[in-house]
Every structure is written in structure tokens, then in C-alpha cells.
Image: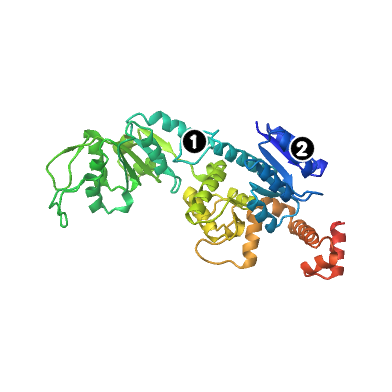
Amino acid sequence: MASILVVDDELSMREFLSIFLEKHGYTVRTAANGEKALHMVQEEHFDLTISDIRMPGMNGLELLARLKALQPELTCILITAFASPDDAVLAMKNGAFDYITKPFNLDEVKRIVECALHKKEAQAGQIEDTFPEIIGQSPEMLKIFDLIRRIAPTPANVLIYGESGTGKELVAQAIHNRSQMADKPFVPIICSAIPETLLESELFGHAKGAFTGAVADKPGLFHLASGGTAFLDEIGELTPTIQTKLLRVLQEREYMPVGSTKTLQFNARIITATNRILEQEVIDGNFREDLYYRLAVVPIRVPPLRERGGDIPLLVDYFLRKYAQLLGKNMQTISSYGMEVLMQYDFPGNVRELENIIERGVAMESSNIILPDNLILSTHSRKKRGMAVTLASGEQKSDTEHKAAMFVAARDEEELFERGLEAVLEDVERSLILHALTKADNSKTKAAKLLKLGFRSLRYRTKKLGID
């Protein structure tokens, strides 16, 4: 397992993180300050460092810069009790993998550590990415990968089903790429995008003069896919007439172009996809039962993103790099707070929606780290904790509503309501006062001005909250 160096001037925090990380199988060493950490990194190998920012002597940002100068490939995470957007941006600019705040959400710490180490291994080529078409390492996707490996070499027809935006065409492409037909064409067609009067011609082709505008013979999808794979997306949208003709193609392995008397041989594999439940369509009489069984020799269900949440960090990283390059931005990561918002959201639009969110975030962000304010989520979330940040319909929330939604979206809504308003507000008040005192170098007069309070009011509040 990976070796982790924890750097913190507080003994209790070093011991706490050591116990937690060792429990999850990591080898952990600790250092009480930056100077000791630098010495240990020169003497020992570490895969990851986790360092506090506020420490006597060399602070965490200075340590980060010196560690990166010493070992550029070393992955670093910074932690602090005083969350500051300026520190977050500076940390990311200096090469930190992520930035998290105390008190810790242990699940979040575990996720960030795993994600950091996974990215390091992938960059070092230690993780074999056997499916570059599909981003995913969750158990749900690993099962699909195994199924693809088993069925790809066979000529069996495959029906891929799942919600819109889950990546069904990517699965079809992966099957084709690992088949004996990989060097032959992969020809996709979206059945719902073409009217019935034209779909028959698109599938089977047509002869010259078959209808007005048919000025020459035109080959159809089945001809173009000869020897390869014909991918029919949204197969559940086919009309009964086209269903009957497609069934004949599958049974007889031949077809006739529109307006032609010549029969052509069909020698392509058919992979279909749908976001409908075809079994129910058969029961309702909307889809031919015999055609369904011809198409679904091997059915594959692609799970929605809410069922494979473990893949969200990998997908975010992929889309972040993709759109940073396309848009010419030096975008390196997303804040841990922003990632927490995404992890609690249920993505009714699935992977396609996540890609849209990240593309928009990269376009809108002015720094090199995506902050929660630039994550625009849909209002159609099915999770209680997946509260919307900005209405996708274009309706604007007030600034207060926006901040309230952000606050709840990144936390456990049920826990907030269980604790009650007074307890939650007390935590917020304490955090703001501590942050103001830190920025004011512990001057209560300056802190009071930052908070727009009178000096006596601040003194009363610090005493009430037990702040020394």
C-alpha cells in the first residue's frame, strides 16, 4: 500500500490521521514541522504528503513549494482549520492535489486520498486502462468491462439499455473495438432523429428513382456497415413497419433497398441501444416480441451515474483536463467543497450532465481551481441532499438563496435540521469570527471592522462562544 507522510504541529492531529489512514491499509509516518518533513522526504520514499497550512516556522504553503522543487512528482494535500479561497487558489497554483478543511469529514478525506493516489498511479502507468473509451473503475463498471471482454469476440447481437446520458454508445464502440470486426466500420444511427419515411432509406438504402429526389442509387447503413457493426440507437422508437422489416433482416440475413428488386446480403453485427424498458414495451404491444429476443441475445444494462458515484472523481478529472485544453485554460482541479457538492448530487442527466457542468465550470472560472459558485446543477435532483445551486431553466436565485442552497448542498440536510437552526448558526458564527481574527492577526478591533460589528459586540460574541 501507499506510504503517506502527515505533517502537523498538533500531536493529536498527527495521531488521529495516522490511526485513520493505517486502518485503511496505508503506511503512515509523521512530522511535527516543515523542516522535519523535508528531511524525511529526502531520506525516505513517500507517495503522498498531507500537511497542515498553519504551522510555526515553515507553513504548509512554503513546505509545498519546497517539496515540489525537491520532488515534482510527489502528490500533496493541504489541510487547515481556516478556510480561505485565496489560500486554496495559491495551493493549487503551487501544485497541491487538493485542499480540505477541519473539522474533517472522514469519508471525504478517504475519497480525496484514494483519488490522489489513483491519479498518481495512472500517470505512472501502473494502472492498466483497458477501456480508454469508458471512464470508470467502480464495481458496476468493472462488471460491464468483464462482460464486454467475453462477448466482443462473438457475433452475438447486443442490446444496451439504460437512462439517457449514461454512455451506451461508448459501450457499443468498446464491443466493436474488441471484436474480430475491429478493423471494419462502426456505423451509428439514431433511430428517433429520422422520420419513418426516411429511416427505411437510411437503413436499407434506395435505388435511383425510388422517390422524388432519389437522383442516384444510395447505399444504406447496413451496406456501409458491411463486415463491421451497425449501431442502432434509440431502437425503442422504431415504428411497427420498420420493426417488421428489421426482423426480416435478422432472420434472413438479407434486405432490399427501397425501390429496388435486387436483394443484398447482410453481414454486419447489430448492436442496439434504448432508454426504454423494452420488456414493458412488448407487454404494451408497442414492440415486437420476436424482434426483442433477436436483438437482446446479450442484454447489457449501463447504470446511471447515481449508482456508480465512485466514478465521479475520475470523470471530473477527465472532463476537467479535456475542457481546460479545449478552452485554453490552466485549470488543474476542482475544490474539495465543489467535489462534495457533486458527490451528493444525483445527476438526472447522468455522465452527459456531469460533462456539461464541468465544461461550464471551466468556461466560467477565472482561477485555476473550480469553486462551488461555478457549478450549476439542475433542479430536478431526486436526492434530498442534492439541492440545486442555480436553476438550470435560467431562472435566477437571489444571492442569499444561492448561498443558502450551496451551504445545504454540501452538507447532510437531515443532520442540519436535526441539530436545529441555533446550533448550526453558532457553528457558522464561530467559524467566521475565527477566520476574521486570523486575517486581523488576532486584533479584535480589526476583526470587528471586518465583520462590521462594534468592538463590544465582538467581545460579547467571543466570550459567549468560548473563543480565547
Q: Determine the secondary structure under disc 1.
A: loop
Q: Which residue is at a point 87% across and 69% down the rendered structure image? A: 456
List x then y, in percent, for residue 33.
Answer: 79, 43
Q: Residues within 10 Å of mark 1 (few under 14, many from 20)?
A: few
The quarter of the picture where residue 182 lies is top left
Q: Determine the secondary structure under disc 2.
A: strand
List x then y, in percent, for residue 395.
Answer: 53, 66
* Precedes in sequence: disc 2 or disc 1: 2
Q: Are marks 2 and 1 in contact (CB under 8 Å)?
A: no
Q: Residues within 10 Å of mark 2 (few under 14, many from 20)?
A: many
Can residue 120 be seen by looking at this rendering? yes
| Of 21 and 301, the residue lying toward us | 21
Q: Which residue is at a point 56% across and 53% down the rendered structure image? A: 331
In the displayed structure image, the side of residue 102 where residue 188 appears, left or right? left
In the displayed structure image, the side of residue 92 where residue 242 appears, left or right? left
Q: Which residue is at a point 60% across and 51% down the rendered structure image? A: 334
Q: Amino acid at mark 2?
A: Thr
Quadrant for the C terminus, please: bottom right
In the displayed structure image, the side of residue 246 where residue 407 appears, left or right? right
Q: Which residue is at a point 72% across and 48% down the rendered structure image? A: 79
Q: Amino acid at mark 1?
A: Asp
Q: Which residue is mark 1?
A: 129
Quadrant for the N terminus, please: top right
Instruction: Find residue 57 and name its label.
Output: none
Q: Which residue is mark 2?
A: 30
How many marks the image carries: the answer is: 2
List x then y, in percent, for residue 351.
Answer: 49, 48
In the displayed structure image, the side of residue 13 where residue 335 appears, left or right? left
| Of 335 and 280, the residue lying toward us | 335
